[in-house]
Amino acid sequence: MKLLEKLLLVVCLLVPLAGHAVPVETDIDPELEPRYRALIAELRCLVCQNQSLADSDAELAQDLRREVLEMMEAGKSDQEIVDFLVNRYGDFVLYRPPVRPETAVLWVGPFLLLVAVAGGVLFMIRRRAAAPQTPALTEEDRKKVQELLRRDPTESDS
């Protein structure tokens, strides 16, 4: 393959990826930008669920990023912005929800699941160990097996 063909192939493969760039506001006050970027990285996209507002290209994420920026420009603190979003969307908007009775399952659930799986594995191991073992062949059984193995398969039993 010639160099030009290789370059053309690379460009053709990268062009579809260009459309996946996440639009992030560009007209941000340079003093607010680090704070803005840090805050949107800590907030979850409500549509994508496994992406932060900074990573998501969903329309709702774009709207929330714009809203966060407007609140920052209005002089609101990070905590005020987070409180506003939690009041509006619930703890789900946070990547690290607070430890409260309502969120206890999120914090304790994985450990309970791990304990349940470990208990199940121990139960299976003990059950298998307590199961009756197949008895070894007696000397008489071994002789019968050896005799059957030596027998010519073309012989008939009659």
Image (cartoon, helix red, strand yellow):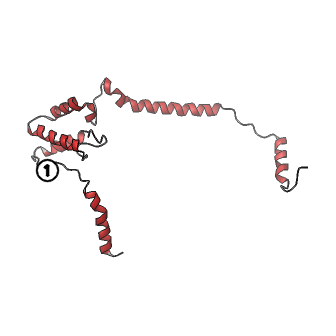
Q: Residue at x 28, y 57 (%)?
A: 17
Badge 1 marks a residue whose secondary structure is loop
Q: Is residue 83 left or right of residue 139?
A: left
Q: In x, y percent, where is residue 27?
A: 11, 49
Q: Is residue 129 left or right of residue 119?
A: right
Q: Is residue 126 above or below residue 5?
A: above
Residue indicated by mark 1:
26
- Within the image, what quadrant is residue 86 found in? top left
Around disc 1, counting alpha carbons within 10 Å, would you say few (fewer than 14), some (14 to 19), or many (20 or more)? few
Along the horizontal axis of the image, is 144 left or right of 44?
right
Residue lying furthest front:
59
| Residue at the image point whose x is 28% and y is 40% from the top | 47
User: Foreground: 41 or 142?
Assistant: 41
- Whole-percent x, y for residue 67 in the image: 15, 39
Q: Quadrant of residue 73?
A: top left
Which of 115/56 is in front?
56
Q: Residue at x 56, y 30 (%)?
A: 123
